Image: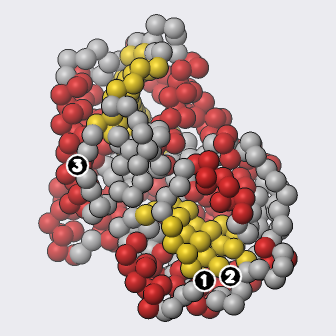
Amino acid sequence: MKILVLSFYYEPDLSAGSFRSSALVKSLLSRLGSEDEIEIITTLPNRYSSYSSEAAEFEKKGRVSIHRVRLPAHQNGMLDQSRSFLSFARYVSKRTKNQPYDLVYATSSRLMTAVLGCFVAKRSSICLYLDIRDIFVDTMKDVLSKKVVAACLPFFGILERWAIGGAQRVNLVSRGFQDYFETRYPSQTFDFYSNGIDSIFLEKKESYEPSSDREGKKVSILYAGNFGEGQGLHKIIPQLASLLSDRVSFRLLGDGGRKSKLEEKVASLECKNVTILGPVTRDELLAEYQDADVLFIHLNDHDAFKKVLPSKLFEYAATGKPILAGVSGYASSFLEAEVVNAKVFRPCDAESGLEAFNSLALRHTHRQSFIEKYSRVNIMSEMTGSLLDLLQEDVM
């Protein structure tokens, strides 16, 4: 048996898709037979233009072969991303032609990897398992101009119907996606395997001591992730930092399409308590988490983001640190129900953020039940079972 894994990002790249795919492959290897193979087609590390990590274009690790596509240089713009994906798609189309796969697994946040997976599966007349991490068509309506949406939305709607309809099973990483997809595709079979906590975030734990209690230092608030339109940091960090200028220092790690906007706003409001740095490795990130007093997350105030559940929340919660979250919709409900000492405020509302910060307990919180429930290893093991069940159904 041979399984094809399509993931635009894969280790050592830094992204939710990379971490998720790497964990799934490990889980598959533990369940497959000694003669079974996994072929991964991905890209060379490219999540951020400012971050690079060495990786081979081709790598063979036992029963796993990894093909990494070299992409043109980009700055995270839509046009750049489109060109990058076309390079990836051309390679996948050529590489997979007439190959003896038994199943295609494709994980997709921006729809097109799902479409590519459907193309490969249909061409080879094999099963397709889709892992959907975002609702691309829904997000387009919120983040693009009305003119662009009017021109593009019908086309992408057709692609979504073709891809979702062409899969034998579809996983949705957020329960917030359920109504959207079940209403539109009532005959499809859906799984709900969320993101989870990687073991690296569970191995090292130290005592928690807020910096506000150490020599009169400011409380340190850390954000680590993307600086994109979806996160909307430029609409909250400068304003909140101004309100908390005497009490808090913000440390922001990452990159993305709205980084320059964020820097401009921070400069215009003369926020001396905001430090913006580039992306870091996961090992470095662990140290950053340990040094922080509070972990910060934010989603822009768009309807589409009321359905998502950011993967970052899982590793944040595993640290035991207080969480300050500017989210709404499903993510807000999830935090309130599942994560102790996480305070939610209205997205893009600095006054609401100030109120939430003031209600945080600056202490370590034991979240053992959350950790056990959302261990990535356990979640991926269950997802692997569903994927392999699909193969058995196809044989029968």
Which of disc 3 and disc 2 is earlier in sequence? 3
Q: Which mark is residue 72?
A: 3
Q: Residue at x 42, y 39 (%)?
A: 54
User: Which labelled disc corresponds to residue 273?
Assistant: 1
Relative to residue 2, is residue 95 drawn left or right?
left
Spatial separation of the CA atoms under disc 2 and disc 3: 40 Å
- 2 and 1 marks in contact (CB < 8 Å): yes
Work out whether residue 2 can be spotted.
yes
Instruction: Give me the residue at 81% from left, 82% from top.
Output: 216
- Alpha carbon of mark 2 to alpha carbon of mark 1: how far? 7 Å
Could you say which quadrant of the image residue 325 lies in? bottom right
User: Quick one: 143 or 208, which is closer to the camera?
Assistant: 208
**In the rendered view, does 183 fall on the left or right side of 330?**
left
Q: Return the disc, 3 or 1, that comes first in the chain's sequence.
A: 3
Query: Is disc 2 placed on a helix, strand or loop?
Result: strand
Query: Observer-nearest residue: 252 or 105?
Result: 252
Give the image quarter of residue 122: top left
Q: Earlier in the sequence, mark 2 or mark 1?
A: 2
* Amino acid found under the numbered disc labelled 2: Val
- CA neighbours of label 3 inside 10 A, class few (<14), some (14 to 19), many (20+): few
Helix or strand or loop: what does disc 3 sit on? loop
- Res 56 → quadrant: top left
Q: State the image coordinates of residue 193 (x, y, percent, origin top left).
A: 55, 42
